[in-house]
Image (cartoon, coloured by chain):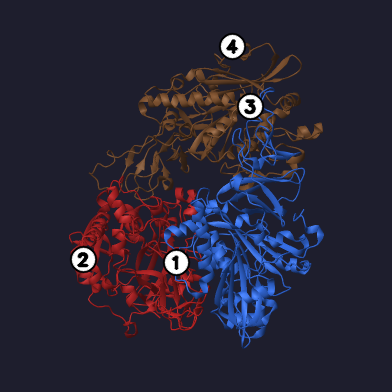
Chain colours: A brown, B blue, C red
Amino acid sequence: MLSAADNDLLTRTAAGTPMGQLFRRFWTPVLLAQELPERDGAPVRVRVMGEDFIAFRDSDGRVGVVEPHCPHRGANLFWGRNEQGGLRCAFHGWKFDVEGNCLDTPCVPQGANYKNSVKLRALPVEERGDMIWAYLGPPETKPPFPAIEFTMLPAEQRFVSKKLQECNWAQACEGGLDTAHFSYLHMSVAESDEDFMASMARSDASIQQERIKWMRDDGAPRFTVIPHDAGLVIGGARQASPGNLYWRISQFLMPNHGYTPNAFPGENYHGQTWVPIDDRSCWVYCYTWNPERPITQAERAKFSEGFAVHAEVDSGWKPLRNRSNDYLIDRTDQKHRSFTGIVGVSEQDACIQDSQGYIADRTREHLGPTDLGIVRFRQLILGAAKALVDGTEPKAASLPDSYLVRCGGAVVDASRTLSDLMIDRFGAPSGHVGAIKTRSDAVAGVSS
Amino acid sequence: MLSAADNDLLTRTAAGTPMGQLFRRFWTPVLLAQELPERDGAPVRVRVMGEDFIAFRDSDGRVGVVEPHCPHRGANLFWGRNEQGGLRCAFHGWKFDVEGNCLDTPCVPQGANYKNSVKLRALPVEERGDMIWAYLGPPETKPPFPAIEFTMLPAEQRFVSKKLQECNWAQACEGGLDTAHFSYLHMSVAESDEDFMASMARSDASIQQERIKWMRDDGAPRFTVIPHDAGLVIGGARQASPGNLYWRISQFLMPNHGYTPNAFPGENYHGQTWVPIDDRSCWVYCYTWNPERPITQAERAKFSEGFAVHAEVDSGWKPLRNRSNDYLIDRTDQKHRSFTGIVGVSEQDACIQDSQGYIADRTREHLGPTDLGIVRFRQLILGAAKALVDGTEPKAASLPDSYLVRCGGAVVDASRTLSDLMIDRFGAPSGHVGAIKTRSDAVAGVSS
Amino acid sequence: MLSAADNDLLTRTAAGTPMGQLFRRFWTPVLLAQELPERDGAPVRVRVMGEDFIAFRDSDGRVGVVEPHCPHRGANLFWGRNEQGGLRCAFHGWKFDVEGNCLDTPCVPQGANYKNSVKLRALPVEERGDMIWAYLGPPETKPPFPAIEFTMLPAEQRFVSKKLQECNWAQACEGGLDTAHFSYLHMSVAESDEDFMASMARSDASIQQERIKWMRDDGAPRFTVIPHDAGLVIGGARQASPGNLYWRISQFLMPNHGYTPNAFPGENYHGQTWVPIDDRSCWVYCYTWNPERPITQAERAKFSEGFAVHAEVDSGWKPLRNRSNDYLIDRTDQKHRSFTGIVGVSEQDACIQDSQGYIADRTREHLGPTDLGIVRFRQLILGAAKALVDGTEPKAASLPDSYLVRCGGAVVDASRTLSDLMIDRFGAPSGHVGAIKTRSDAVAGVSS
């Protein structure tokens, strides 16, 4: 439960808000790279944390993310021609490069020197992991790019997507960190084994019938949280075979990234980054990666149709099952097969998160032991936002290597602690992996 | 004409407003029973006077109307599974019965006693007259259920429907009490008798050509109002055959019920209850009943297609002819056949009431003698709302038997007063009928 | 660049605002005459500068523009029957004529004298130039009707249309006065002559390949502005053949009319009047006229499909290419043929003007030498609005003859000034033409 003031603090990210300031100390995805597929192609509108930008890819493949209005008369550069070396305003032909420099003001008589006196605001941009990342904060605090694993691998070892979510970022993030709900929201209620597994088909858990049944049969996992430089390890333990616990361990990375808790060694990892569009909606950037092997074509096809964190979306990345159509809930299916009657893990998450309201009211909730991860997430991020107001920069931003962490699922003896098993598997309680095994061509970390 | 302050007082029914407090001293329909057709069926969203609820029918057929957000994390119970004995939240499985008691918190480790510490707000509910009625006020002032006649008859003697209306409740109610407008709004302008009657086909008046012509030929009825314990008798007298008056007498029952003035002895009665959704829209619950005989299948078919108070609606009870499509007005028809060019008495009413604005501005009106009923309605209900603010509970709520009234049409000698003819027909000036002739199986007053 | 206060002053025209007061000193088009095609036909809704009215044509062909709500109970007269001599409210039959006089209150008993005590607000109306013009200001300052040329010619010598524009009136007007943008916004980028001219097909300039190339090749015209009693002459000069300048000269007429700069002697003139619906949208009334000959059927057909100032619109005068569909921009066309990828000069204008925002933010712009006309327009109209606040009535309103001006295109020796060439062609620097050659049947200036 939060005070109304802390709920506002947590959820508001417009420029000038404390949480908005904190977010603006970190790199944030603003587009998938595929949304700017070609050099000199069509510009694209971007809205992030209530701020509007126009993005374009120039003749050299560089991406610009600039303020939308031409400094001359305020026409929107979305309508501009993306020409050799820059974007030209359609009204009177002023032209700008990806850094916001004015290259040309052809309607101004020769001799006048307008072009050096105007400049577009242009964000620092990095293209990593098949996404366009931007930095919206003050130049002097621009951090190094964090070692987020999927961005560091060869392109064939990852799959990325995005989806529109019609609620505040924080409750969507909390839903991602809350691994207890799998026993309910994503669970089958079918009695026959065949129906049971069929109704789990869009969940990555479908690969492992045993794990699903452990989740179904123990709906009150015991949680442990381990803080580290980049965020939190959040582990929930359920009863497995006698004497053993089934651990599902997720990561929260500052300020808005979360990794799912499913991957046993060798399996695919999944993660999500929640990027506020405004305070009532967000883009969820979704990624699957495998540090050991390429993502197969069959997997890519499956993810494209909606699977695990990936939603089934239209050409504008809006989920086909969404607020406006009640997520196509099938009440008969809800009665006999799935807990929700809604198809897709991602869509089930969206439905229940959206249902908390456009901005969840945390003043009336009653948190329990399984909400420990959420409590710690709030403490961490509210603390960082308040500290920044007081002048203390967020530590995680300055420690890019601290982001190189993993997590996942494990079955271990009931006597082992979360810290024990993180050390056993990854070498550190934080899940930090000192170095990743990558092919040499991935060193640059840039996808295209 | 009202002051702006009184106009606000009359029209605002959110929790905490004076009129909202008054409304919350009475039972109000919140759904048709058919909207919760089966036990353990799909939950339904309810919005009434700006408050949101979820309604569901449990395994025993009981109906719950509860606050929408689960106390755990605020997920909306609309998405819940309606299981044996209660509604289970889709997020983490907390389960509640129709009284709001928490039956289960499966994600909480055994030993912890959460379920006794949380409770959903649950409204008192009665299922009467094929409708779900709820009481939204303080427990200590919950009144007995009023003797509204259609709710006390066997189901075969009534027909119920509802329609969305996109304006404030009060102007819709005033339109229902204003019987003078029949000479205009619902009137045919056709010259031939055949066309004249054809263009009245959706009006109950169509059964009686003589009456329609009286209404057409005398457009300035003389009004008399008789107050009684539950509300007002409002009678309008028009010239009929020489020496006789054609009286059309309606009832207003506190705080939001109205009966139409058409029924001669033996004919069907019609009534409406205006239930605010918010201050700019309302549900109109519509009912036809006959104290003496079942409503026939032919009548039911006719009402379902839109007739008298019943509108032609879509599957969500939204009228097919509505604000968004200009009620499908046919200007040619308006020129040659009907006064409005709009099909349906109910739709004509909605059009003209909606046209007063989402909330009618009563500071600029010019009321005349035919508006006496409206004047007295406002005095009564504004007086009751103000009295309640001062601590005086509304009398009508405590006198459920006073609601057992009738009204209708009559042709009588011009020397007779309204009071005379009410006594002659019903036994009392108020239209109160001491007892209703019902079959024994209707005594319980519950429809299912 | 304007201060935020002046930007508000310029753009806000609701009743009571300074600019709203100024606008209300002038006659304004509120409908095309064809929107009220027949006597006793359907009433029409009108919204102008945030005020709502109902317009109707009575049995004698006269047009009423009246307040929408019946004084009785506030029903909207849009639903009224347009009967012999007036509009009758559909609720209780009160009837009003085009001057707002109450003709009948049939629901009021005889003897009562209601109809003389109520009156609808009714605007003074003139039907001129195939448009319905109204005056919304105080009666004592109602001006004579201005000598706007297209309204004074026989109907066959003009063509009128209108289009919805989804932005504030002032930036649309500024776009109309800014003739520098033709070298960019409306320009072809095609390399072959054939493609070049084909992609200019919807521009009046298409008739004169030479002029287009001058516009393409000199994108920094030099501007001169000549103020006169009714407004401003705005001339921009581009390099033409050696030693010659190609002048494009437009007119601004107070408070919201603009003439395009294209017409060489004998060619069609075009003009636009920007009428605020509210502060975020306007109707653009568009007109083409030829003082010397009828507009041909071929020209009318071309204009109806969208040409020059005329847009391609649906049955409600909304452009087919508009905000909601990104003006059907074709990015491939933008790359290879036209500067915008949008079809239609009118639509290109609308796109770029809309793109400045619903209300352009003029506090961040950087005006240059080609924006001289815009600067002078703002000075003129802001000055007049401020003067009116101080009690000085606008001079132009009292000088109707001063509106009889022309403008257009010319190629002259580079040594000639704008004033020289205006005198040469029209007889006065203002473009004022002492008398127009009209047929005798056009003297009355009324179109129907």
Instruction: Measuring from the top left, give residue C436's x and y in whole percent.
Output: 27, 78
Q: Which mark is residue B1?
A: 1
How far is disc 1 from disc 3 in space, using C-alphas? 60 Å
Instruction: Measuring from the top left, give residue B355's x and y in whole percent.
Output: 51, 66
Task: Name the residue nearer the viewer: B275 or C394.
Answer: B275
Picture layout, residue B396 above or below residue A119: below
Q: Which of marks 1 and 3 is in front?
A: 1
Closer to the N terminus: mark 4 or mark 3? 3
- Could you tell me the amino acid type at mark 1? Met
Q: Work out whether residue A30 can be spotted.
A: yes
Instruction: Measuring from the top left, give residue A11's x and y in whole percent.
Output: 48, 34
Q: Which mark is residue B117?
A: none
Q: In which quarter of the image is residue A238?
A: top right
Q: How crowded is mark 3: few (under 14 residues within 10 Å), some or many (20 or more)?
A: many
Label 1 lies in what chain?
B
Picture layout, residue B252 above or below residue A415: below
On the picture, is B278 further left or further right than A181?
left
**Regarding mark 3 in the picture, which secondary structure is present there?**
loop
Q: Do the residues labelled 2 and 3 touch (CB within 8 Å)?
A: no
Q: Which of marks 1 and 2 is in front?
A: 1
Question: Same chain for marks 1 and 2?
Answer: no
Residue holding disc 3: A179
Residue holding disc 4: A427
Q: How many labels does the image show?
A: 4
How far is disc 4 from disc 2 in space, using C-alphas? 84 Å
Q: How crowded is mark 1: few (under 14 residues within 10 Å), some or many (20 or more)?
A: some
Instruction: Measuring from the top left, give residue C396's x and y in whole percent.
Output: 24, 68
Label 3 lies in what chain?
A
**Regarding mark 2 in the picture, which secondary structure is present there?**
loop
Residue holding disc 2: C228
